[in-house]
Amino acid sequence: MKRRIIETPIMFDVREAIADEAWCMRNNTGFDAQRKVHYGLGLGGADLIAITRGRFVGIEVKAPNGRVKPDQHLWAQAVRHQGAFATVVRSALEADLALERARACRCPNCDAEIEPLWSHDR
């Protein structure tokens, strides 16, 4: 019988690895039947939500053989469409590399590291 690797220990490793570089919190999603209310950032929302140098980052944590579900893919597309950063990671090292990419400027007005969008408004 194959042993299934669960994502929770990986998520704790990721949070610890990026703690010095980004504000980060767990994004629990679901439905409270008693109160009849949905919580979290919506169906498919990333496991971890981070902000690094003013940029929103959604981090979906997967086990080595884990697959991204269709609703998770749609959520990531919506985030990217708004100029934020969304990624899937399978280790703390991948999370560190993803944060480096997230901090790279996407602003057409400069080659500097990411700055809040309002600093580039004209």
Image (cartoon, grey):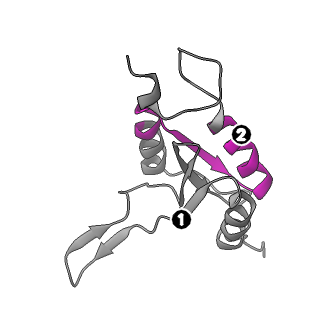
Please state the horizontal and vertical placement of residue 68, each as a whole percent of the image.
56, 50
Q: Dot 1: what SS?
A: strand
Question: Above or below — where is 111 with respect to 93?
Answer: above
Amino acid type indicated by mark 1? Met
Residue placed furthest toward the bottom: 34
Please state the horizontal and vertical placement of residue 100, each as a whole percent of the image.
71, 39
Instruction: Name the magenta segment's main secondary structure.
Output: helix
For residue 25, the mark is: 1
Residue shown at 60% from the left, 44% from the top: 87
For residue 85, the mark is: none
Circle 1 crowding by C-alpha within 10 Å: few under 14, some 14–19, many from 20: few
For residue 100, the mark is: 2
Q: CA distance from mark 1 to mark 2?
A: 18 Å
Residue stretch rendered in magenta on the structure: 78-102
Left-right relation of 80 to 96:
left
Residue shown at 67% from the left, 44% from the top: 99
Q: Based on the picture, tell me whether residue 106 belongs to the magenta stretch.
A: no
Using the rendered view, name the quadrant where residue 40 is placed.
bottom left
Q: Dot 2: what SS?
A: helix
